[in-house]
Image (tube, rainbow, N blue to C red):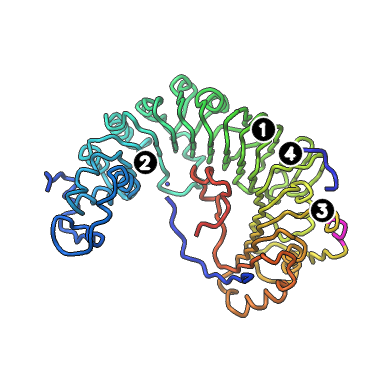
Amino acid sequence: MEPTGRSTKRMRPAPPDIHQSTPGPAETTDLEATTAGRTQHPPPGAGRDGGEGSPDRISDLPDAVLGEIIFLLPTKDGARTQALASRWRHFWRASPLNLDCRGLSGNFPGAILSAHGGPVHRLCLPSLLLQYRADVAGTWLRSPSLDKLQELEFYLELPITYRFSFSRLQLLQPPPASIFRFSSTLRVATISQCHLPDNTVETLQFPLLKKLALVEVKISEGLLQSIITSGCPALESLLLRTSFDIRGLRINSPILKSIGVHSRFVELIIQDAPSLERLLCLRMDMRMRVSVISAPRLATLGYISQDSPDSKIMFGSTVIQRLCVVSLTMVVRTVKILAVHMNFNLDMVIELMKCFVCLEKLYMKIQTDSPAGTNFWRHKHRNFITSQDIRLKTLVLGHYRGIQAQVNFVTFFILNAKLLESIRLEVDSRDYNDGFFAEQCRMLQMEKRVSRGAQLCVTTGSHNDVSSTVDLSDLDLVDPFTCRC
């Protein structure tokens, strides 16, 4: 920051419609028996043990590569590779197990642990086990196969709903003690729908843990602070979703890189976070005050919303409230990616660009019924155009309808952003047709674009809505908002 101058797995969505303009023989176990009677469709030549077909090049891969392939497959598919060829039969048991219980019923996970017999690298269990079948969860977690477990996830089987979460607050139970036996090996953990009492502070020591998500967890501010500062000294990513009993959090961490907050916080203070790169405040209507005192590498920020009158974000003495720059005493040069929830207000966006002077990507979630002004800019923002270096490369707008105020908004960047590379307009499927695309190209004056390499993309898809679907994998992404459809 410098003094101011002039200067649980997701459903894959259906592919969007897009218009784009460019410039130019082993003993059979109970588990193996589940594949019996099913028609197998191995890849060409997979039957190396005889039969016709092209050469089995996959089986010629090194053992380590085949083991990695099996590890990355869904649990059931990994087990079924034993039926492909004799070359494959020992790999499933020899490979570290990736046991994801989504879609598995009853005691089948226990049967898999018994049949595999080898080490388990990753274990995903439904969080309801912690509340209603804690004895079963404890038995599975004590299995010797899990002695070197590196990833543990208790996933939600139903979406988070705030209306019911608070009524369940008193029903949350502590997790089984066996969950803490992985302290010396665990690197990734998602803990959901349980109560972490303060007396667990001595057992919550995970020296190798790099990623932690707490989802619908009752935990005190003191215990959470202890986890961040001393319990998990290697922690790089922290996700808090609907965590109870927390009104504020102060971050002091030399290695934390990503923070995602989707909870009813009142205050989040980034006091000293020299490695922090991504700050995702994901409840767009929450009344949170965020104060960034020291985060010299912060590059990704979102969502900032104009919905809540009490929401506020501060960088030193620079204050942004409801997306209005109330006080601009210091500019923020580190932020390159910004996601906001607002209407098509060009005046407000220009004020934000005066604050985030090195902004390269802007994502805007638009309310479908948001009011729009005129967004006239040629005279009003003449000084900004002549004095400011607009570095924006990517502009993504949701709920675009092509009305004049929106056209004026987009045209400002087409005619003035010299480094612009792409504009993505996300429209309703009812508006999507060849005529609409051609009309928008004309109205937006694409032929006059100041950046000759800029591309216009009109699509019915939407950019990644991490505000409702965020998980730990999103926190690893340099740009968690980009479309991955």
- Alpha carbons under labels 4 and 3: distance apart: 23 Å
Q: Where is residue 80 in the image (x, y as percent from the top left)?
A: 23, 51
Q: What element carries label 2?
A: strand
Q: Which of marks 4 and 1 is nearer the N terminus?
A: 1
Picture disc at residue 124: 2
Picture disc at residue 314: 4
Q: Which of marks 2 and 3 is nearer the N terminus?
A: 2
Q: Is mark 3 on a helix, strand or loop?
A: loop
Q: Is the magenta stretch mostly helix, strand or loop?
A: helix
- The residue under label 1 is which amino acid type? Ile
- The residue under label 2 is which amino acid type? Cys
Residue 383 is covered by the magenta coloring: yes
The 10 Å Cα crowd at callout 4, few under 14, some 14 to 19, many 20 or more, is some
Q: Give the range drawn in magenta.
A: 380-384
For the residues labelled 4 and 1, say whether their Cβ atoms are less than 8 Å apart: no
Which of label 2 and label 3 is nearer to you?
Answer: 3
Residue 102 is covered by the magenta coloring: no
Question: Is residue 167 rendered to the left or right of residue 53?
Answer: right
Q: Earlier in the sequence, mark 1 or mark 2?
A: 2
Q: Is mark 1 on a helix, strand or loop?
A: strand
134 relative to 346, above or below: above
Picture disc at residue 388: 3
Question: Is residue 169 rendered to the left or right of residue 301?
Answer: left
- Alpha carbons under labels 4 and 1: distance apart: 10 Å
- Alpha carbons under labels 3 and 1: distance apart: 31 Å
